[in-house]
Amino acid sequence: MSDVYQIPGLLITALCHVIVIYYLSEHKYPKKRFTLYGCMYAAGFVGIGGYGYAVRGAALLFAYIVIVVCTFLFSCIVSQSCFAKKCFLFITYFCLFSALDNVLKIMMKLFCPKISAPVGFYVAVILRSMSLLLLLALYKKFAEAILRSLADKSRRRWWNLALAALLFYLLQASLSVLNVKETMSDVKLMSALFVINIIMYAVYWLVFSNISYMKKDTEAALVRQNVEYLSARLSAQQKAEEEHRRLRHDIRHHLETIAEYAKTGDTPAILAYIREYSIKVSETAVRRYSVNRTVDSILSVYAGKAEESGIAFWVKCNVPAELAVRDIDLIALLGNLFENALHGCQKSEKKKLYIEIYIRTQNSRLTIVCNNICPADLELSGSLPKDKGIGISSILAVCQKYDGSLEYKVEHGICSACAVLNL
């Protein structure tokens, strides 16, 4: 093999891809399983790339296409995001990869024409990998929270963004082919690359402006949801206050009844009447689940919904009045979690239905556990339900936004969801 020196460089590139995909993806599998898939991918990458460099010609182009497809499949397999979002992130990454690759190779030809092939190859590989990891660090710091907070609701918009990214990737790939075949001069290629990159960055500025709009749209929907929770809570309180006013108004009649029993010395009747009156007062009182206003509002609303559906609703909540979590994030997390639990009970077609909720803060972590009766056909893929809808995507987005985790378990007809946020 004449180009055996390129094998370590291929391995470096494969490892760079694995690292970037790990931090770009919304993890579907634990680290050990991801590492196993990453090793399998890296081995295939090196094998296919080595074959392409050894044979050259059309085989090299074919190897490149196969590697791109394999990398895309790998990123899809290990990520929980919706398919459109996976496409956008992957194409954007490979577009940046191609742009850096083209720039570095042309610059090596223009400014270091006498450098040996092996040295030039490894200088390009190392600089490209370092640049990609730097861009990854910038993404983690400035853009990750925004992208993950969007969940998977706006799939049409994700497709529009993915198509825009695909256009620039195809242009970059075309320049890569022209560079390999040397059908254009290096100066013309550099000029074309400069123009394409300027346009690409301008379009991506519009892309992230669109993403910012998507985020605001999502937050507006959560604000509306919060208003609905608070309105429902206020309505329940108003009804309870009206009932209490009526009971206070009727207190004279109750005292007269008790007095009549007292005249006749009917103590058991007095005690039974007082007990019945106490039960009625307790039933009309608004139950408070938490000192945190947002948590209490959401729990109260779903307690009412559960009661209407004949579902037992049990809560143990120990959180402070103030949490280092935004209200709209709490609404997205708790609202969707309890809504899914409610639907799970309703679809189970079992006689004894219940929802158990445990919420607590400990060691700067907010932990929410929700157990509920679920349908017999509920299946998991990894640690999440196989048919992951918008609700679970929203829960997952909030957990990842706060560097937390989300895990589902199904045992003996009971679904247990555990969400953890780092505060």
Image (cartoon, rainbow, N blue to C red):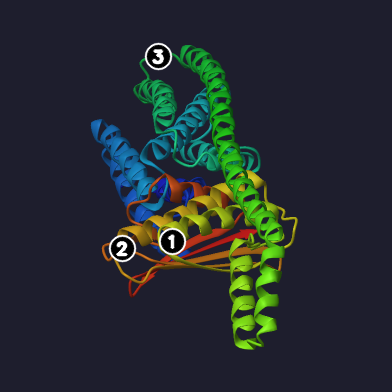
Amino acid type indicated by mark 1: Thr
Q: Residues within 10 Å of mark 2 (few under 14, many from 20)?
A: some
Is 13 on the left or on the right of 380, as rendered?
A: right
Disc 2 target residue: 348
Q: CA distance from mark 1 to mark 3?
A: 41 Å
Nearer the N terminus, badge 2 or badge 1? 1
Circles 1, 3 touching at the beta carbon (< 8 Å): no
Question: Which residue corresponds to the image point at 37% horizontal and 21% vertical from the top-left?
Answer: 174
Q: Earlier in the sequence, mark 1 or mark 3?
A: 1
Per the image, label 2 sits on a secondary structure element best described as helix
Residue at which label 3 appears:
184
Question: Label 3's element?
Answer: loop
Circle 1 sits in a helix, a strand or a loop, which is it?
Answer: helix
Q: Amino acid at mark 2?
A: Ser
The answer to whether residue 134 is left or right of residue 163 is right
In the rendered image, residue 325, in percent from the top left (x then y), is placed at 68, 51
Q: Where residue 150 sits in the image (x, y, percent)?
A: 52, 38
Quick one: 407 or 229, which is closer to the camera? 229
x then y, percent, for residue 108:
53, 28
- The residue where tag 1 is placed is 35
